[in-house]
Amino acid sequence: MSTYDVDDRREYYRIEDTIALEFTLLSGAAAHSSDVLHDASPLFNLLSDLHLMDFESQHLLRHISERDRTLANYLKVINKRIDLLGQAVAQSLLRDIGLPRKVSLSEGGISFNNAQPVPEYSHLAIKMVLMPQALGLLLRARVVHCSQRADGQYEIGTEFEALTDSQRQLLARHILQRQALERRQARE
């Protein structure tokens, strides 16, 4: 039996978002491992690694900026060029993953609708591309609920498992950016 409590799901702020999402059931050793997942698509792994490296190098850029503004500005331009390439890769991946769908997302998990049920307590590999920054993440999750909706779809609720600090912080940054965008839109 799970020690998962409904209150645990509300530990993080949730946003409604539209993202490209694909998932697969994990079984056997893969389901219970805490290893970082890698996708069969080299482009998806490239996109994911680009964002993780960008995130992990931000503090270095701040240190460089304190010592040499010209070099820091040049590196920012190079970073923008790499971001543009990442966005092109993401557009290609969106064709493979499928049309974006509405989800409810937090640092703790994701819920989404699906045409087929997914067994509770099963383990998933969730591949998602968060827009507009084209952030590709492949995360482990455990299904905490699966309930049929009135329209025949199934609402699948999951909690993330074994997130690295970088993955969690990238999710948090995306959620904060979406919140800020929603606030700006509400004021306008």
Image: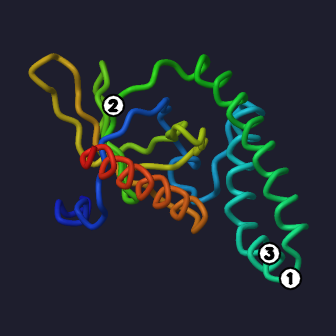
The amino acid marked with disc number 3 is Ser
**Relative to the observer, which residue lies in front, 27 or 12?**
12
Q: Which residue is mark 3?
A: 65
The vertical placement of 183 against 60, above or below, is: above
The vertical placement of 161 against 31, above or below, is: below
> Mark 1, residues whose alpha carbon is within 10 Å: few (<14), some, or many (≥20)?
few
Residue 187 relative to residue 149: left or right: right
Kindly indicate whether the residue at mark 2 contacts the one at mark 3 (C-beta within 8 angstroms): no
Which labelled disc corresponds to residue 108? none
Name the residue rendered at 43%, 45% in the picture.
123
The amino acid marked with disc number 2 is Lys
Q: Which residue is mark 2?
A: 102
Name the residue rendered at 29%, 60% in the picture.
13
Tell which residue pokes out farthest to the front in this image.
188
Q: Nearer the viewer, mark 2 or mark 1?
A: 1
Which labelled disc corresponds to residue 67? 1
Name the residue rendered at 68%, 45% in the picture.
48
